[in-house]
Structure formats: C-alpha cells, structure tokens
Amino acid sequence: MKKKSLFKLIALVFSLALLGCKEKNQSTLRIYSIIHDEESEALTKLFTEKTGIPVTFLRATTGELVNRVITEKNDPQADILLGGASSYHIQAAKEGALESYVSPLAKNIPPYAIASDGTWTGFCVLTLGIGVNEKRFSQKFPGIPLPKTWEDLLNPEFKGEIVMTNPAASSTGYLFVQNQLQRLGDDKGWEYLLALSQNVGQFPDSGSAPAKLLGTGEYALGVSYLHAITKYNHQGFNVTPVAPPKSVGDVDCVSIMKNSKNLSAAKKFVDFMLSAEAQELMSAITFTTPVNPEAKAPEGSVSIADIDLIDYDVRKAAETKAQVLDKWSKSIK
C-alpha cells in the first residue's frame, strides 16, 4: 500500500510538472501591432490555429508603439512589434530594444527585406503614391488633368484639397518626407514640402486616414500607400491610384523585443509571418505585395515592376529622423 501511494504521489508530481511546462510553453504571445485591426485579428487567429499559442495585440500608431518599445526595452510589455517601415525598426534596434533572430524562412526573402544584424525582417512591400477621388476632382477642377507626378500636387488650385499623414505620428508620412528629400536633395526637398503643405487641408495621425477620407469624398487628392488606395478602389469607392515616377519603396517589418518573456513563441511568430500562407492572407486583405516569392498577390494589386522607385537609403532615413521631424514641426506643422 505504501509503495502504491508513493507511486501515485510520484505520478501526480510528474503530471503537475508536465502541466506546468505546457502552461509555460503556451503562455500568451503579446504583440504591439502597427498594422490595422482587421489584418492583425486575421493573422493572429491563423497563428493560434496553427500553433496553439494564444495571442493578444495592442493596435496603435507607429510613433506611439516604437516609443513604447524603446522605453520598455529593459522590461518589455510585449514580445513582438508587428508592422512599420524599416527605418522605425532600425531606430528601435539602435536603442538596443530588439532581439536578433534570423528565421529559417528568411533564405527565400530578398536582401532588402532583412536586417544585416537580424533585428527586423520585412514581410510585405510598401510603395507610396497619389490617390484621386475622381468624382470630387472633376467637380472641383474641371479641365485640369489628373496629377501624375509629385510636382503636379503643387498646383495652387489644389489648396485645401489634399490630405496626407502627419510624419511625426505615422511611418507613412515620414516615408513621404524622406521620398522628397532623397529624390530632390535637402534644400529643394524642403522647398517642395513647404510648398506642398500650403495645399494640404489635413494632416491626420493615422496612415490609413488619407485613403479613407478620399474614399468618402472629403478630399479630392491624397498621399498614401498605393495598396491602401487600391484596396478602396477594389471595394467600390471612387478612388484611383496613381504611381508617380521617383517614388519610394520600403517593407513592413516584424521584430522581436529584447528581453522578450516569451522568446520561443516570438520566434515562431516571425517564422509564421515569413510563410507564404501568412503573406497571402495579409495581401488578400490589404493588397500589399508579399516578399516571399512563393506567395501570390491578389489580382488588381500594383506590382513593384510597374513602379519607378528611387534608390531609397533607409539607414539615412533612420539616422536623420529626429532632425528631420524637428525641422518639420518648426517649419511646416
């Protein structure tokens, strides 16, 4: 009887130990998400279905979440930073806030989408363009051709009819500022930005706002990611995407926080985001272009091959960010 009781006790202790290990392994993955709620929910749901790992996410603007990541680097309150252009991940890595991890799936990813130190990896391509609400444009500007270049937006007739994102709050807006500074040079770039600001009617904080405001007909013109404009066009809104020459391309990235409390699950999530399945799901919702060559973009999305891109210096964009935004706030907004 004593032996049986002892065996039962050992079995109970062993079972509890296994349960404890399982609970630890299945602890919730926490994500700071810059991408929108719809795709955040779809991606995290699929990840949980495939791995059994529960996920919670906090959705906020790029600036807010990157600042959180840097501030919390010694005691992170999340494990993953999902979304945001590479310059923001470079900024966080420079502050020592990101973990280095190179996924086995990264071998198929183009070099421009992978950090040399493994602190971030791109999962979709982002390109800027002009959105036009053709109905409002034709009513407001009869006889004026649709803009096809960045310089066309400087037409004084467009005053108050352009919407673009606030660069201090959104990676979309900052990417546009760097687009102009890098294609024109600093002096002419700032001249362009100052002139354009006179035509801008609103600088919302959210990168998704310009495409939405165009779709609802509140503005005739907007600066936005081409995929966002294409998405609203596909949904039946009277919004036309225009890919001006000398635009800029970047990648939406995923990173792991330094000192992550759930590192194993975080690595699995990075692997997941580089998979063709995850990128096709993302692209089906957003019309972004996947970086995984095995993933297929939906019909109607804008191909990188059809866009005239500048040679974008992402490190310069990251290193000069504070200086550029300070000048922006003093000179323009």
Image: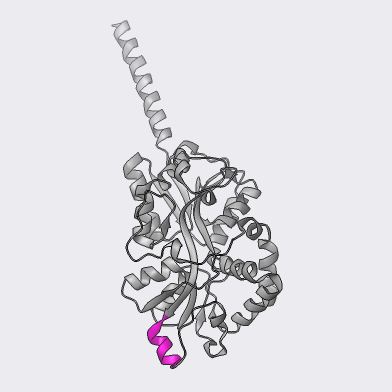
Residue 299, position as x, y percentages in the image: 32, 63
Observer-nearest residue: 56 or 202?
202
Q: Quadrant of residue 226?
A: bottom left
Magenta residue span: 133-142
Residue 273, position as x, y percentages in the image: 42, 47
Q: Is residue 162 above or below residue 329?
A: below
Is 96 positioned to the left or the right of 257 in the image? right
Magenta portion: prevailing SS class: helix
Magenta segment includes 135: yes
Residue for point 47% across, 36% down = 264
How many numbered marks appear?
Answer: 0
Residue for point 39% across, 83% down = 134
Residue 256, position as x, y percentages in the image: 52, 45
Q: Quadrant of the N terminus?
A: top left
Residue for point 43% across, 44% down = 269
Observer-nearest residue: 244 or 180?
244
Q: Is residue 220 above or below residue 292?
A: below
